[in-house]
Image: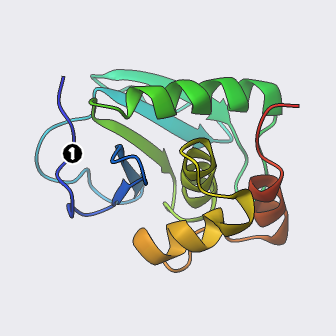
């Protein structure tokens, strides 16, 4: 098991020190080690990869189709970021990926009202693209 390098392209460091890489699938895979887990946020099944992967059905500019499943997968993703190379990705790497990264930040202790700003400051200033994605992050969590 490994982890990403702090400061590597697309790598977000959560307050606990966990590292997760966000990226857009439109771009070539970054140089260096491959993920141990990839979680793909797409409206259709993701392309096959040579590492373990999971899929959250999540249409572009929208929210997860099954929010309960998204919560389960994102919790598991957050747990695995502690020492494993985990990436989250959608086509562009901003809206859905930024939203999922903000949800991981909430799981890591960032107040929901601050999670979007946290991700924008540390990952991509245009992360989380729609008002409903921002609202999803503010309301993210169990029950």
Q: Secondary structure at mark 1?
A: loop
Which residue is labeled 1 in the image? Answer: 4
**Does residue 8 sit above or below 1 in this rendering?**
below
Q: Quadrant of residue 112?
A: bottom right
Q: Quadrant of residue 4?
A: top left
Quadrant in which the N terminus appears = top left
**Does residue 1 sit above or below 123 in this rendering?**
above
Q: Is residue 128 visible?
A: no
Residue 137 x/y as whole percent: 74, 55
The residue closer to the viewer here, 141 or 111, is 111
* Outermost residue to the right: 143
Number of labelled discs?
Answer: 1
Q: Is residue 5 left or right of residue 73?
A: left
What residue is drawn where x is 80% and y is 26%?
68
The residue closer to the viewer here, 70 or 47, is 70
Q: Is residue 93 visible?
A: yes
Quadrant in which the C terminus appears = top right
Q: Is residue 135 left or right of residue 126?
A: right
Residue 20 x/y as whole percent: 37, 46
Residue 2 x/y as whole percent: 17, 30
Q: How is the image coloured?
A: rainbow
What residue is drawn where x is 13% and y is 52%?
31
Q: Residues within 10 Å of mark 1 (few under 14, many from 20)?
A: many
What residue is drawn where x is 60% and y is 41%?
107
What residue is drawn where x is 33% and y is 61%?
10
């Amino acid at each position: 098991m490994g982890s990403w390098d702090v400061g590597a392209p697309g790598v977000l460091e959560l307050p606990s020190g966990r590292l997760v890489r966000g990226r857009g699938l439109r771009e070539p895979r970054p140089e260096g080690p491959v993920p141990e887990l990839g979680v793909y946020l797409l409206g259709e099944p993701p392309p096959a990869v040579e590492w373990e992967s999971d899929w959250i059905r999540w249409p572009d500019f929208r929210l997860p189709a099954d929010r309960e499943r998204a919560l389960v997968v994102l919790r598991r993703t957050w747990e695995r970021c502690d020492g494993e190379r985990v990436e989250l990705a959608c086509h562009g790497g901003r809206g859905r990926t930024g939203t999922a990264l903000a949800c991981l930040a909430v799981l890591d202790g960032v107040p929901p009202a601050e999670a979007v700003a946290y991700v924008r400051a540390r990952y991509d200033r245009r992360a989380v693209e729609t008002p409903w994605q921002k609202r999803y992050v503010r309301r993210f969590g169990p029950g």
